[in-house]
Image (cartoon, helix red, strand yellow):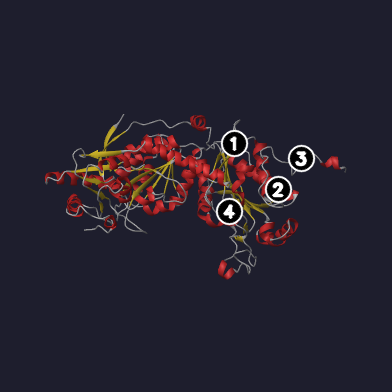
Amino acid sequence: MSELKLMKGNEALAEAAIRAGVDAYFGYPITPQSEVIEYLMTEQPEKRTGMVVLQAESEIAAINMVYGAASTGKKVMTSSSSPGISLKLEGISYIAGAELPAVIVNVVRGGPGLGTIQPSQADYFQSVKGGGHGDYKLYVLAPASVQEMSDFVEDAFDIAFKYRAPVLILSDGLIGQMMEKVVLKDQQERLTDEEVIKKYDSWATTGKTNRERNIITSLDLQSEKMEARVHRLMKKYEQMELEDTRYEEFQTEDAEYLFVAYGSSSRIAQKAVKLARKKGIKAGLVRPITLFPYPKKVLFKLANQVKGILSVELNAGQMIEDVLLSVEHKVPVAHFGRTGGIIHTPEEVLEALEQKIIKNGSIRHHKTRESSIL
Amino acid sequence: MEVLDIIKPENQVFCKSKLMTDTTLSYCPGCGHGTAHNLTMEVIDEMGIVENTIGVAPVGCSVLAYDFMNIDMTQAAHGRAPAVATAIARCWPEKYVFTYQGDGDLAAIGTAETIHTCNRGENIVIIFVNNGIYGMTGGQMAPTTLEGMRSSTSPYGREAKTMGMPIKMTELVANLPGVYYATRQSVHTHKHARKAKKAIKKAFENTRLKKGLSFIEIVSNCNSGWKMNPNESNIWMEEHMFPYFPLGDIKVNGKLK
């Protein structure tokens, strides 16, 4: 039975993992996402579903545990926050290279370095533009509510197994820490070992039976083979763009000005749209739900309609690059965002739209990258 | 005694295991890796556990172990094989999981994973081939390079004052409660290879009995990295490696020797 509860984003994600029939979670504590492993340890999911939960000695160990479990066809995930994700990137690159299904959660905090434990969206580049080494991409889902922290767990695993590729849930300290009501999904059965073997016998390393041996590796010493592997990955990413790009539009039908914002920023931008409309400014919002694949087409289309776009992000200007690539310089684009763990207000966002776009509609592109703190 | 009296299955040390593929080994002639691979495969074959065995290959000379071992294998990031094996063993408690790692992988970059996997007493086998050098990258200093030993990154010999002394990983992990069996072997003679095989078999038996972690160090040669011919390297190993890394059991059935 689905259940309505008041929960923290991190807890909702952890509970959703148990209910989604996840086989294993490996993690390491870091603020502001420690509630995920705390919740799992308290809930004892090994008693509820047989799910394995292990606190690793480091984020590096945790992501390599994910690699190990994923290589045997198990549904496995980890979570961390920004500095911890930096440590996991080597492993994430291996998971992408070895074509393994896995889910990684980043409850982002401010950086660089040890930064701050306060919310941020400064890991956009790291998430969307690679992060780890080599030619790979992550399918990136950006939840904007506690409900989506819960719902995206299952969505992420569906994509991970559809493409045999790692999926990142890019949350932030705000969504992870805040409490909202959430409708939890029904409990799904975990696959039995026999079912896992049957389902993934063509690739998973579960023990060599009468078939050829299965090998999980990201290594191809022959250049032609390595290139073929890269091409195979690129094909997956093309297919993701075609079939699994997700976004949400808010009051864009008649919009003259557009906010583009994801995750917690999109909640604030949505408020800014309402404030703008009260003042007679026809603003709208596009919320990318997937940051890769990026909803380029809808932005390209809206660029013919609006007079300017403000990319609203809790960082110094990262997603704006994808907005610029999407609209191909058809309209002025500017960035607004607070950093350091400060969360912008709807009033600030609206003011930024008025100052950067409406009053100065002729903003040149080189200006769009300037520091945009008011 | 006639030659034919000697050629008996029980005397065959170098018979190629059925679980070795026909792929030509990438190891230098004279290297101990091939023998260590073969012994491991012989044990898995003799125990009849291939359907339930998952190997984890490292980064280093034996990165391509999966090309030679005809079993299901996952190749891990450098040093992370114990973490990879931990997860597999946790998710598949009835399976036999082993890692096959070199000294750079296990005792340098992967030290944290090695120690914590041993400390948790994961029900796996770790096979640790220690040849005191980084073979694959071309003979650089390893954490187990002997004092005074030359390598491409210790061209004047390892200086303990600035580079530390070689690390005795097996003694170190043997002190952790999670380790049930810790032993140091070699495979450079028939006699030694047989003993090593017994140790490997004992380790996999421990997995079967869910006793926890078995740690088998195999002190081996690296004739290319040491810049010697195979025979010289084996003699050098006996004269120099064995005094610092003495062969024999360090911990048996959970008890230190």
Instruction: Check disc 1 and report the residue beneath it.
Output: A213
Asked whether the beta carbons under mark 2 and mark 3 sit within 8 Å of each other, the answer is no
What amino acid type is highlighted by mark number 3? Glu
From the top left corner, tell me how far across and down residue A309 is, in percent. Answer: 24, 48
Q: Chain of mark 1?
A: A
What amino acid type is highlighted by mark number 2? Lys
Instruction: Check disc 3 and report the residue beneath it.
Output: B10
Circles 1 and 2 on the same subunit: no
Tell me the SS state at disc 4.
Answer: helix
From the top left corner, tell me how far across and down residue A373 is, in percent. Answer: 24, 58
Left or right: where A333 falls relative to A165:
left
Circles 2 and 3 on the same subunit: yes
**Label at residue B195:** 2
- Could you tell me which quadrant the C terminus of chain A lies in? bottom left
Which of the 4 image quadrants contains residue B45?
A: top right
| Nearer mark to the viewer, of 4 and 3 | 3
Q: How many marks?
A: 4
Question: In the rendered view, would you say A230 is above or below A48?
Answer: below
Q: Nearer the viewer, residue B35 or A187?
A: B35
Tell me the CA gap for discs 1 and 3: 28 Å
Q: Chain of mark 4?
A: B
| Nearer mark to the viewer, of 2 and 4 | 2
Asked whether the beta carbons under mark 1 and mark 4 sit within 8 Å of each other, the answer is no
| Nearer mark to the viewer, of 1 and 3 | 1
Left or right: where A281 falls relative to B36:
left
The first of marks 2 and 3 along the sequence is 3
The first of marks 4 and 3 along the sequence is 3
What amino acid type is highlighted by mark number 4? Ala
- Residue A169: in sight, yes or no? yes
